[in-house]
Amino acid sequence: MSNHALKLNSTLELQRFLEDKALALSDNKRLIVAISGAPGSGKSHVSQSLSNSINQVSKKSEVFSMDGFHYDDAVLKEKNLLSKKGALETFDVLGLKSFLERLSMNTEANVAVPVFDRDLELSRSSALIIDQSIPLIIAEGSYLLLKDKPWGDLQNYFDITVMIKSSREVLTERLIKRWKSYNLNPDEIDQKVFHNDIPNGEFVNLNSINPDIEIIN
């Protein structure tokens, strides 16, 4: 890991950087890039936009999201964690690690991974097939770059690490807009934004490794 992050001014610069890295790969090799950031930083949007742009000519990349490893609401209720959904303890980190290991080894013809459905608020098992021929995997999620175990073990599978930074004001505005779109009432929005999302984002910023690349979004 680098001590000083390479600072890029746009996602276009990141796209070109990743395309160059992917082109330099030898046959049957795979590059796994981790994109992290606070809730509302835009990491999911950036990751998908990068993948879409890279795939315009030929399919070379796939997005693998940490959100697919959310515990189900029934499990969270049993653990009294439903109000904290999105906090690091509400994810199956060891399940995530096992899939990263499989994707990194790239010895299987394809790997079926879970995908989180925001409309249904649950993870759909085996909802995405990642083919062995895909050379670039863009892994995205808030906690991918945390220093401490067991999360810190995930970094064994990342070739490049990226952190997306946003100001608290920008994050707050985006998060309020996000939860309004789900028709939540003001008290529910307040709970999610100021008692869950923003504290989780501050935790990410304070407890993550120094990334290889940093982008302001």
Image (cartoon, grey):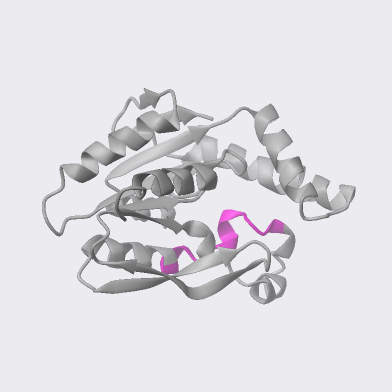
Does residue 150 lie above or below 2 as drawn? below
Quadrant assignment, res 208:
top left
Query: Could you say where residue 19 lies in the image, as x and y percent from the top left?
Result: 27, 40
Residue, far front: 57
Would you say 199 lies left or right of 18 here?
right
Does residue 105 lie above or below 14 as drawn? below
The quadrant in which the N terminus is found is top left
Would you say 158 lies left or right of 47 here?
left
- Taking depth in this image into account, of 105 and 201 the one nearest to the observer is 105
- Taking depth in this image into account, of 99 and 205 the one nearest to the observer is 99
Asked if residue 125 shows in the view, the reply is yes
Asked if residue 211 shows in the view, the reply is no
The residue depicted at 22 percent of the width and 40 percent of the height is 21
Query: Could you say where residue 45 lies in the image, as x and y percent from the top left?
Result: 53, 45
- Taking depth in this image into account, of 38 and 11 the one nearest to the observer is 11
Quadrant assignment, res 20:
top left
Query: Could you say where residue 189 lies in the image, as x and y percent from the top left?
Result: 81, 48
The quadrant in which the C terminus is found is top right
Query: Could you say where residue 124 lies in the image, as x and y percent from the top left?
Result: 55, 73
Would you say 5 lies left or right of 186 here?
left
The residue depicted at 69 percent of the width and 57 percent of the height is 84
The residue depicted at 50 percent of the width and 76 percent of the height is 125
Residue 32 colored in magenta in the image: no
Q: Which residues are magenta?
A: 84-95
The residue depicted at 72 percent of the width and 64 percent of the height is 82
Residue 94 colored in magenta in the image: yes
Residue, far left: 26
Instruction: Count every numbered label the image shows and give the total.
Output: 0
